[in-house]
Structures are given as C-alpha cells and as structure tokens.
Amino acid sequence: MADQTDLAHPKEQQPLHDRSPVVWTHGTAIILLGVLAIGAPFAVLRLFGPSGSGTWTWDFSMGLGFGALGMAALQFVLTGRLRWVTHPFGADIVYLAHRYLSWGAVALMLGHFAVLYVFHQGALGVLNPLEARWELTVGRVSLVCFLALIVTSEFRKLLQLRHEYWRALHLALALVGMVTAIAHVLGVGNLTDTPEKRALWLGATLGFMLVLAYTHLIRPWLQSRNPWRVVGNSAERGGVHTLQLEPEGRHLKRWKPGQFAWLKVGRSPYSLIEHPFTISTAPEKGPNLSFSIKPLGDHSAELAQTEIGARAYVDGPYGAFSVDRMADAEGFVMIAGGVGITPILSNLHALEARGDKRPITLIYGSPTWEDASFREELATMRSRLNLTLVHVIDAPPAEWTGESGKIDRDILSRHLTAEMRVWPHLLCGPKPMLDALRADLRAMGVPLHHIDYEIFELV
C-alpha cells in the first residue's frame, strides 16, 4: 500500500550508521509500540474472554480478524509521514515496513474468512450480497478493498496506472476498506461485547481518524500558510532540470544533506498530486531549496517545465541518507548511477561548505559522457574537497581513456583500497545496479553495516 512512484526518490535503505543512544532508544521505542499495537487485540481477546461457539477454531478466527483490523489501522500511522515515527529509520524504511505489514494484514483477513468458511460456514450466512446480512456484506466489501489495494500497488506499472490516479484510488480503497471493516466489527458484535474490547476498538478508530485528519486536512492547511516560490529552472546534462525554490514564509527546519521532500507545484496544498524528490543542495547553501528532476514519467515531465514564479508547497524533510548520521567516519565511499547522483551531490555540497577534508572516493556511472549530470560542478568540487572522482561511462566516446562499461567488482577493486572497507559506502542508483554492487562490496570484505543505499526507481 506504500506511496510508490518511479520518480527520483529513495525507496529502501540499509540500517543507519548513526549510533546515537537517543536515536537507537527512539527507534526501539517505536518498534515496541508497533508490536504492542499489533499484539493488543490478541491480548484483549485472550484476557477478556472469547465469544460465540467457544471452540478453538472460532476463537482462532476471531483472533485473526481482531489482529487484521488492528494491523490495518496501523498502516495509516505508517503512511502518515509522522516525524516521530520516521526520524529514527528514515521515511523509506517506514514505507517498506508498511508495504510488508499490509500484506500481513490481508493474510490475516483471508485467514479469518477461510477458518470460518471451513469450520463455521453457518456463521457466514449466504454469500449473495442481496440476501446476506448487512454486517457480513460490508465485511466482504472491506476484504475486496484491501485485496485491491495490494494488487493495484504491486502491479501499478503493469496496469498502466498514472501515479496521481493510483494515489487517489489507493486512498479511496483504504478509506472504504477501513470504514466497512469497522462497520463489520460493530455489526457482528463478537469483538465488541465487553467494555475492554469496545475501548480497544474505540481507540483504534479514533487514532485512525486523527491520523487521517492530520495527513489530509491539517498538514495541507499548515502548508498553505507557508508557501514557496519557484525562482529558477535550469537545464542540466542528462535531461535533468533543477528547480530552485525560495521560501515565502518559514525556512525548512531540521534539514540534513541527502534528505528529500514531497513537492507540489502549481496546485492546491490539498492536491493528491505530489512527488518526493531529493533536495540536491545542502542546508549550508539555504534557505533556498533545489530539486533536481529527471522527466521519467508520472507528472515529472510537467514539473521539469515549471515556469518561474509558480507557487509550490514542500513537505519535508525526510530520509536518513546523510553524512550527518556518519559523523565518526574517517572517509566516505560514494557510488552513484544516473540521476542517483542527486543525494550524493547534496552530501558533497555540505562537506564542501564545512571545509571537511576527509577523503572521499566517488564512482559515478553514466550512460554516456554527455549524460553525466553535474560533471562540471563535481570537477570544481575537487579543488575544495579531498575528492577522488571516477567517471564510469557505459558507452564512452572514441577518445575516452577512463573507466567504461558498468560499475563492477573489477572497477571497484581498482579504486577502493583495503583501508576504505570500514568507511561508510553510500550507494544510490537503479535497483539492479545496487543489487550487484552490494554483492560485490560484500565479497570484497565490506561489512553490511557500512553499506548504506537508496534506490531511485519503483519497487
């Protein structure tokens, strides 16, 4: 059910290098709260007595239904972009958890129905919605909605659903699914027949409504009071366009290099048409924001042609792909492919502005030399950073004398020394490239916890 798009933004991330006790304590607390939220329905059902036939199959089915609805309500928290949830892990990890937990919620729903169908078919009544009791029909409507959420999310590209249409459909299915699920629980009554059970469902329902109201009403209202203005649109190599935004209200707070934000341009802050992009400059070069966008589809081509003066709204920052979380590193290895250079560039800007002299090795793969976005800017940075820059060109020109082809283990071995294995390795690019690079780096002896990566495509 995650908000997926094929635009340049992070979708997955390895564990953070930030070993701050505060961050780890915060993250552990969030995980424990999540476990508690999922386990609470089972605990309440066990402690305050089952209802119905009293057989173990009946109780097991009720437990599955109880847990499924609790887990479904939790998904609204995971997709609500709540900073206290996303901060320890990064929004990308939270969305990945949402994706897998949504599968788990639907599996529990199917299990709930299957156990009743096999052992207690009479409780299901007739399947014809024109003849069935209303509370059973809405339960089936809810199950169909949640199944449709999974199918349309996992096969969005195959179904050729534009991102904005998919997102509206996703929200509609989630709302109808959750409302009908709550109606089913209330109508059947098996899970609300004691004060403790009623209190649990009241809390889950109110929590779901509050998160929904904050996400789609309160946050857009806050954004409307703090707009941005597009003051620059420059074309870069590789078809990339960099939009520069100037704040008309407050500056962006708690912004770290390498982070991203959801961007709306020329639309209402309540619009569902928004996309996440890396902030390609560094906080030290603010307060203006730069977003480097490659037209890959789903509204990004329109964004790349944005006119100067257009009004914009920014929701962020999010993400944890930042050198600020690796303060104790002796140096950095950075590997980028294509437009994946943008979060790398942001981190380099920050190190440059701070006069940081730690060694950096950047290996940057591009389809052609002309497609190497920001190559002049990177070359200039070499005079102000302790930066070793290695371009790898897939289809190089005839006079090319540098590395060519795909970034592979041979190229890595030529440019990465043994002492670099304990440095953070920041990877950003297409998923197939990163899958291969992670395997190569592990084979070269780089510990898994020193490999941090972001994927710039739909997962």
Image: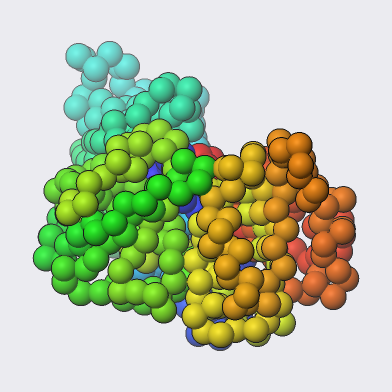
* Numbered circles on residues, count: 0
Percent x, y of residue 110: 46, 32
Direction from residue 397 to residue 201 in the image, left or right: left
**In which quarter of the view is residue 262 placed?**
bottom left
Please report the residue visible at 29 percent of the width from the left and 28 percent of the height from the top. 141
Direction from residue 448 to residue 83 in the image, left or right: left
Percent x, y of residue 215: 24, 56
Display coloring: rainbow
399 relative to 93, above or below: above
187 relative to 152, above or below: below
421 relative to 128, above or below: below
Confirm whether residue 103 shows in the render. Answer: no
> Which of 38 and 114 lies nearest the eye of the viewer?
38
Please report the residue visible at 37 percent of the width from the left and 26 percent of the height from the top. 161
Percent x, y of residue 123: 35, 28
> Which of 36 and 12 lies nearest the eye of the viewer?
12
Direction from residue 280 to residue 308 in the image, left or right: left
Percent x, y of residue 419: 85, 75
Farthest residue in the front direction?
Answer: 399
Please report the residue visible at 68 percent of the width from the left and 82 percent of the height from the top. 358
Split into 4 quadrants, where in the image is the N terminus?
top left
Please report the residue visible at 52 percent of the width from the left and 42 percent of the height from the top. 238
**In which quarter of the view is residue 162 placed?**
top left
140 relative to 106, above or below: above
Confirm whether residue 161 shows in the render. Answer: yes
